[in-house]
Image (cartoon, rainbow, N blue to C red):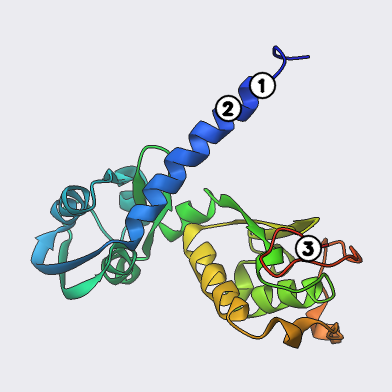
Amino acid sequence: PETAAGAEPSWLSGGRSSLDAIEQNRHGLAQKFEFSFDATPLSEVVEWLTEQAGTQFYLNTTEIELGGLADVDTPVTATGNASVREIIRRIADPLEMTYVVTESGIEITTKDNASDQPSIRYYDLSYVLPNSANVDALVAAIQQSVDPLDWDFNGGKCTISIVGSMMIVSSPDTVHQRIEMLLLNIARMNPRNAEQAVKLGPRATIEGVPSGFGGGQSAGGGGMF
């Protein structure tokens, strides 16, 4: 045994600490603020986000300057009332930039660099589907409607794996956000709509995703497959 009885192994406690820090920073993206930037330097916008959200935001200046579309003095003009996530999208999309959630904070970097730093997240599908009949159909729906060109079978870097009722996704944080919205909308539907398997067409073939789990779930989730 790695540890005394009842104690967590170091890899488990270390992983929990890292995950907790990342999730705390991710939650900061949902906060909403009024904002008004009038040709404000990008570096000052990032400082403002740090002060308002209480989460450390920082620029990956090396990657941004290598991308050639911006630098720390690039002027930003935008106004509104939105979540931190939406504020970043408004100022970053025109510059081909996005964000990466890390243990130390929120990194603002290029989209290419973000795709090289995927986040791995775990989705318990028992909160979404009544049984395992349509797991493949759900994965196909994600891969066809959420940034289709970013998935591995299309030459991208995003991947999906299934273990029991758990869907494991490796992708940039912006892709995870779209997956969350898709799953939320499915969860709002009558679960009986998904009790019978939907036959996948030839264009919806799922590669590398095992199926045939069997079993059922309780209404509250956590017992699927």
Local crowd size for mark 3, using a 10 Å CA cut-off: few (<14), some (14–19), many (≥20): many
Residue at the far top in the pictured view: 4
Which x, y percent locates residue 127?
Answer: 66, 67
Q: Residue at x 31, y 66 (%)?
A: 95
Given residues 47 and 70, the one toward you in this image is: 47
What residue would you read off at disc 2?
A: 13
The kind of residue on which mark 3 rests is Met
Instruction: Locate the C terminus and report the quarter of the image it occupies.
Output: bottom right
Find out whether the residues at labels 1 and 2 contact each other: C-beta distance under 8 Å. yes
Q: Residue at x 17, y 51 (%)?
A: 43
Q: CA distance from mark 3 to mark 2?
A: 27 Å
Q: CA distance from mark 1 to mark 3?
A: 28 Å
Which numbered tag is attached to residue 69?
Answer: none
Which x, y percent locates residue 103?
Answer: 42, 38
Q: CA distance from mark 1 to mark 2?
A: 7 Å
Residue 204 position by quadrant: bottom right
Local crowd size for mark 2, using a 10 Å CA cut-off: few (<14), some (14–19), many (≥20): few
Instruction: Locate the N terminus and report the quarter of the image it occupies.
Output: top right
What residue would you read off at disc 3?
A: 224
What residue would you read off at disc 1?
A: 9
Image check: 46 left or right of 63? Answer: left
Find out whether the residues at labels 3 and 2 contact each other: C-beta distance under 8 Å. no
Image check: 90 left or right of 100? Answer: left
Image check: 33 left or right of 214? Answer: left
Above/below status of 198 relative to 73: below
Which numbered disc, 1 or 3, marks the residue closer to the eye?
Answer: 3
Q: Residue at x 66, y 85 (%)?
A: 190
Which x, y percent locates residue 44?
Answer: 13, 52
Which numbered disc, 3 or 2, marks the residue closer to the eye?
Answer: 3
Which x, y percent locates residue 94?
Answer: 31, 71
Residue 217 position by quadrant: bottom right
